[in-house]
Image (spheres, rainbow, N blue to C red):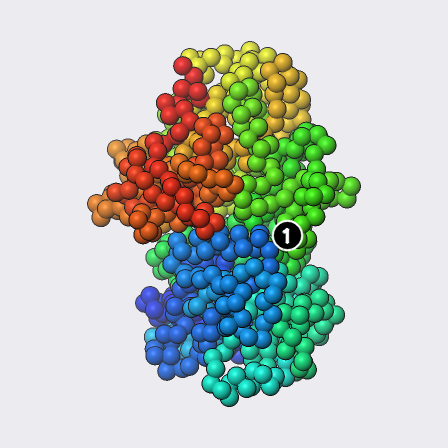
């Protein structure tokens, strides 16, 4: 075995081999793959080979699209047939909510260039004569989709990699991975050592073991997954004999299974409830081509449903049942990208649709490794979207939940219930008593909205087929009423959220934002370091705040921070709660080596209560003698002030465009401060408000969010961040690339749209936007603005169309609406309300 390599890939399943192939394709031909047994001997060999394009995540959608484009080309390149059967993929709908899901998805698919057709039940019957369609209300079809032979695909990728010079060592086990003083890795195997710059972990069911070699707690635990292959059926054989086309992959989402033809019979793969986690502490060291004991009882409800849908399925015997390990993460999407805390260690793990995702995941990861950035926004699969809270116990609960929910309706406002409430702020019980309906972000419980006392969904609301079939309400805790019903249209919380928005705008509101990610940056080098990293100027004076962005080396937007200068050499950084590990990891990896800057993560040390609304000053001034006037305490400044007997960093900033303060306080003082604010606010009608209200209020200010309007794919200037990008301050990360991008010209421009004629469904983000029928952009966010009484969308458009007054069309759940580009910040465009005046 060679002693040096540029990159070492651990794992010879389809995912690892695809990384090797793409690294070699990008010129890193001195890369090596190490496999402990034979290629595909992990999960890959027994996969059913389906290539579903369907996915609600932008990142995963892009990966799947790339794979389905790449795989058919491999035979011409390598001479190996990958067994790609482009038979199409049909997803059936029995309920209106399921159809809405398909309509929403079709919008997402259109914006990323994936073709989706809608079928009537009769059209389904014409393609799938063995399928009963009487109770269907429709279906979608991916004509480009189908299935493949996973082992043949892996071999073709392996040949493509080897032909370019990469090498593969089989029957070789990685036993240790050590960081050398110079920064290289030493990968120790049972056949010798390799020194390399980069290590990629693509070890499937061994992910946690491989991670542990470098001190990582990788959030992957597999779940058992079974599929059944039947004996041949005469009707299918007759179709073959008559030269009729294969009937394609059939998915009955409302019954939780997929089905396709297999060797003249049928293959049925259910996603059942109660499938257990497996290999919780990793497979046996000798494990190879391993299957588990079948458990048909668990599949019984799905088998019965399949027999009703396709009676032929019940007319033939079972030939074989495959029960294998399928890797899972808490949200069901893979983790593809850099590991946190260690440089040049990459993860490509947790793949539950790994055959489908392998091509795209290998492609993007190779770009990330070789060029330092992926070319597609990969936030949806970034390994750092989970934090240290994702313990082994958490993973067991969440991964089983993710598996069981593969086929449930994926509402945009869905909140899953397993492993909750896990991280609670001290005011959790108080918020709950006030009617909070919680959501979960990064393990934290956060009020989404507030239900009035005694509110619960009525029997009529609950007694609908959608509710029963699609579990479109969160499972209530024992003894609690059901208060929420998700929908792609306006949900039952709509009016309550509207009331919260109007209340905070008329009076005063209190919000728990303790989940914010927080970090202290200290030391003599802190100012210069932040200045060289961020787009905006670092506040010069103690007590000043600035909003700033961390760019990619290409000029896209990676992260957003509020920077508060808390001392001559002390900065307090706040960013989105869900991005904690992601944001902090970038800062930590960029630290200067000379020790002049120290980072202290303080997320769990500080709680944050947002006090906002026209009477917020009146409330706060009852608890402090600090001068809260606009003159003494202007917008974008902060001070440590008394709040009764407690204290807080009061920051004059918020995300909703109202007068107000974020009170960052020692977390152990939170309930005291909460009680003081509620008591002092009683005379001013203080009420709590939640994240959904905040989202509506921020839309009315055209405030942008990372992962929506802000992305590595959009230049910071395209996203309308010009006023936060101090081009004149000197060099900062991404500045040259930003200027070069501006020189090349922009393909997009951020805009705010008013959507006309909406009755029951506002935009949510990801809807296609048209001019004269031609796709010219996509919504990035959307919703109803209660202060301005308008349905709104934020969008990225072709730049020439982003002028105020341009008339466009937007498709919301398949219906076209007129949309007009309006000026930014439809609420209080002069910022008089929040800045005072
Ligand atoms: C029943 C079933 C049906 C499925 N059907 C589909 C489907 O239709 N479509 C789809 O897209 N997906 C499907 N999947 C999922 C798919 O099988 C996986 O997502 C995919 O195979 C994962 O590939 P991988 O390369 O990540 O992992 P694996 O194939 O498990 O490869 C990991 C490799 O790493 C090696 N390794 C681990 N540790 C070390 C070490 N220390 N040193 C050296 N080598 C090491 C292992 O030996 C193994 O070969 C199915 C899964 C199951 C269980």
Tell me the residue at 34%/31% (across/down).
823
Tell me the residue at 30%/38% (across/down).
806
**Looking at this rendering, what residue extends furthest in the right direction?**
479
Tell me the residue at 50%/42% (across/down).
761
- What crowding class fits label 1: few (fewer than 14 Cα within 10 Å), some (14-19), or many (20 or more)? some
Q: Is mark 1 within 8 Å of ligand 1?
A: no
Give the labeled residue for mark 1. 466
Quarter of the image where the N terminus is located: bottom left
Side of 613 relative to 769 (left or right): right
- Identify which residue, 44 or 736, lies in the foreground: 44
Query: At which x and y percent is residue 12?
Result: 50, 73
**Looking at this rendering, what residue extends furthest in the bottom direction?**
241
Q: Is residue 702 above or below residue 468?
A: above
Tell me the residue at 49%/63% (across/down).
119
- Identify which residue, 601 or 672, lies in the foreground: 672
Image quadrant in which you'd find residue 602: top right
Query: At which x and y percent is residue 774?
Result: 31, 52
Query: At which x and y percent is residue 237?
Result: 56, 86
Query: At which x and y percent is residue 626?
Result: 52, 13
- Identify which residue, 298 or 108, lies in the foreground: 108
Quarter of the image where the C terminus is located: top left
Secondary structure of residue under mark 1: helix
Image quadrant in which you'd find residue 75: bottom left
Q: Is residue 380 visible?
A: no
Side of 804 relative to 150 (left or right): left
Q: How many discs mark residues in the rendered view?
A: 1
């Amino acid at each position: 075995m060679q002693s040096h390599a540029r990159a070492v890939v651990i794992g010879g399943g389809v995912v690892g081999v695809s990384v090797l192939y793409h690294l070699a394709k990008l010129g890193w031909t001195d890369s090596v793959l190490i496999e402990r047994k034979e290629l595909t001997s992990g999960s890959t060999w027994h996969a059913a080979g389906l290539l579903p394009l369907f996915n609600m995540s932008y990142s995963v959608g892009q990966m799947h699209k790339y794979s389905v484009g790449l795989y058919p080309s491999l035979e011409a390149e390598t001479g190996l047939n990958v067994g790609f059967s482009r038979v199409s993929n049909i997803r059936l709908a029995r309920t209106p909510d399921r159809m809405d899901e398909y309509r929403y998805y079709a919008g997402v698919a259109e914006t990323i260039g994936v073709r989706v057709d809608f079928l009537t039940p009769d059209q389904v019957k014409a393609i799938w004569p063995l399928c009963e369609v009487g109770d269907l209300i429709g279906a979608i079809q991916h004509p480009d989709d189908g299935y493949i032979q996973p082992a043949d695909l892996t071999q073709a990728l392996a040949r493509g990699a080897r032909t370019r010079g990469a090498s593969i060592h089989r029957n070789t086990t990685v036993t240790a991975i050590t960081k050398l003083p110079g920064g290289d890795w030493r990968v120790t195997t049972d056949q010798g050592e390799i020194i390399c710059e980069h290590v990629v972990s693509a070890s499937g069911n061994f992910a946690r073991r491989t991670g542990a070699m470098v001190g990582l707690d990788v959030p992957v635990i597999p779940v058992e997954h079974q599929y059944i292959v039947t004996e041949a059926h005469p009707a299918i054989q007759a179709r073959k004999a008559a030269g009729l086309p294969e009937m394609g992959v059939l998915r009955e989402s409302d019954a939780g299974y997929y089905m396709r033809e297999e060797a003249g019979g049928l293959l049925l793969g259910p996603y059942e409830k109660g499938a257990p986690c497996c290999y919780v502490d990793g497979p046996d060291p000798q494990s190879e081509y391993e299957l588990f004991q079948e458990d048909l009882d668990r599949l019984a409800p799905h088998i019965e449903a399949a027999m009703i849908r396709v009676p032929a399925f019940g007319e033939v015997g079972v030939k074989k049942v495959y029960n294998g390990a399928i890797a899972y993460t808490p949200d069901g999407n893979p983790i593809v990208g850099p590991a946190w805390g260690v440089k040049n260690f990459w993860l490509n793990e947790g793949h539950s649709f790994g055959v489908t995702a392998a091509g795209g995941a290998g492609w993007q990861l190779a770009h990330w490794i070789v060029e330092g950035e992926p070319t597609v926004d990969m936030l949806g699969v970034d390994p750092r979207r989970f934090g240290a809270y994702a313990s082994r116990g958490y993973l067991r609960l969440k991964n089983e939940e993710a598996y069981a929910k593969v086929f449930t309706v994926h509402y945009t406002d869905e909140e899953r219930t397993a492993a909750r409430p896990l991280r609670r702020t001290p005011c959790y019980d108080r918020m709950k008593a006030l009617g909070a309906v919680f959501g979960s972000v990064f393990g934290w419980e956060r009020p989404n909205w507030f239900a009035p006392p005694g509110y619960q969904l009525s029997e009529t609301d609950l007694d609908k087929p959608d509710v029963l079939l699609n579990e479109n309400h969160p499972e209530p805790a024992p003894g609690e009423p059901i208060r929420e019903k998700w929908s792609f249209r306006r949900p039952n919380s709509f009016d309550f959220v509207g009331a919260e928005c109007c209340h905070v705008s008329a009076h005063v509101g209190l919000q728990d934002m303790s989940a914010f990610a927080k970090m202290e940056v200290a030391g003599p080098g802190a100012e210069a370091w932040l200045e060289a990293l961020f787009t905006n100027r670092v506040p010069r004076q103690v007590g000043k705040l600035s909003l700033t962005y961390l760019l990619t080396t290409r000029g896209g937007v990676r992260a957003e921070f509020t920077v508060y200068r808390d001392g001559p050499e002390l900065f307090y950084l706040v960013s989105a709660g869900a991005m904690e590990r992601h944001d902090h990891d970038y800062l930590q990896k960029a630290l200067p080596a000379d020790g002049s800057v120290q980072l202290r993560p303080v997320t769990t040390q500080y709680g944050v209560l947002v006090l906002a609304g026209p009477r917020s000053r009146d409330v706060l001034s009852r608890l402090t003698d600090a001068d809260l006037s606009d003159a003494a305490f202007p917008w974008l400044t902060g001070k440590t002030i008394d709040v009764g007997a407690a204290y807080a960093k009061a920051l004059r900033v918020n995300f909703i465009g109202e007068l107000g303060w974020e009170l960052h306080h020692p977390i152990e003082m939170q309930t005291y401060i909460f009680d003081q604010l509620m008591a002092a606010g009683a005379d001013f009608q203080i009420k709590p408000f939640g994240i959904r209200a905040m989202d509506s209020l921020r839309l009315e200010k055209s405030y942008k969010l990372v992962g929506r309007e802000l992305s590595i794919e959009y230049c910071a200037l395209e996203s309308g961040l010009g006023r936060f990008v101090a081009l004149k301050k000197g060099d900062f990360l991404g500045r040259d690339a930003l200027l070069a991008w501006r020189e090349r010209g922009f393909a997009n421009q951020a805009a705010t749209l008013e959507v006309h004629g909406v009755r029951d469904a506002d935009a949510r983000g990801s809807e296609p936007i048209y001019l004269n029928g031609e796709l010219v952009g996509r919504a990035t966010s959307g919703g109803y603005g209660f202060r301005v009484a308008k349905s709104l969308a934020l969008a990225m458009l072709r730049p020439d169309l982003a002028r105020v007054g341009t008339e466009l069309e937007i498709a919301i759940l398949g219906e076209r609406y007129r949309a007009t580009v309006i000026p930014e910040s439809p609420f209080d465009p002069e910022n008089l309300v929040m800045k005072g005046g």
